Image (cartoon, grey):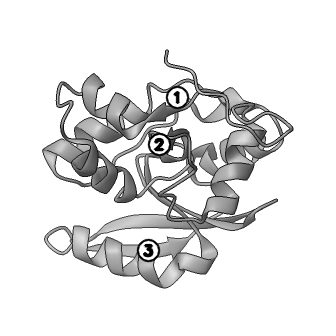
Amino acid sequence: MPQRFLLDTLSTPLGDLLIIADEQQRLRAVEWKDYEEKLYRLLARRYKNDPFTLTEAVNPGGLTQALARYFSGDLQAINTLAVASLGTPFQQRVWQELRKIPCGTTITYGELASRLGAPTASRAVGMANGSNPVSIVVPCHRVIGANGALTGYAGGVQRKAWLLAHEGAIARQGTLSLYNS
């Protein structure tokens, strides 16, 4: 019997955000509405051996409200949200490490690779980062290029810049503050 995923939409300053959760109140995906077709293709591919149905729901498990609080300035509201997305063991390691990057902090792909004990795996880390199905909560936007460039955000560089400014990682002058925690 297919598992049931719950879908809600949140209006944000950056556009509508799709929130997909399971019945155990864990996030399965968070994606911008303008990438909805890509999201559904990704879910179909990732869950081809574990079928699901998608049902609209209001604030499943309080997840939508937590994301709304984040966008309203309560930056810590998303830190403890449960996530259960499918990926390779390496992707899972990268995504777990992403959640350890404090709000208001950025690191480079190389630094993330080093934290994983694979200092030469910057490209593989970048690929796993780009495959993250739970944007914002698994904060792939906090990873930047070695030269400080805001590269590699599937939702668009403008959204990445907004998120980093919202979290205090970008100074008002538009320069990037790089912290290695």
Comes first in the chain, label 2 or label 1? 1
Residues packed near mark 2 inside 10 Å, few (<14), some (14 to 19) or many (20 plus): many
Residue drawn where x is 60% and y is 65% of the image:
156
Q: Position of residue 74 (x, y in %)?
A: 77, 31
Q: Nearer the viewer, mark 2 or mark 1?
A: 2
Q: Are marks 3 and 1 in contact (CB under 8 Å)?
A: no
Comes first in the chain, label 3 or label 1? 3
Give the camera-side residue of 69 and 57: 69
Instruction: Look at mark 2 in the image and give the residue it sits on.
Output: 138
Instruction: Look at mark 3 in the image and give the residue it sits on.
Output: 39
Residue drawn where x is 69% and y is 46% of the image:
163
Q: Secondary structure at mark 3?
A: helix
How many angstroms separate mark 2 from mark 1 (CA)?
A: 10 Å
167 vs 23: above or below: above
Tell me the amino acid under the disc marked 1. Answer: Thr
Q: Position of residue 103 (x, y in %)?
A: 62, 28
Tell me the amino acid under the disc marked 2. Answer: Val
Q: Position of residue 92 (x, y in %)?
A: 25, 42
Q: Secondary structure at mark 1?
A: loop
106 vs 6: above or below: above
**Residue, far top:** 181
Q: Position of residue 164 (x, y in %)?
A: 68, 41
Instruction: Please identify the quarter of the rendering in which residue 47 is found.
Output: bottom left
How many angstroms separate mark 3 from mark 1 (CA)?
A: 23 Å
Tell me the amino acid under the disc marked 3. Answer: Leu
**Residue, far front:** 147
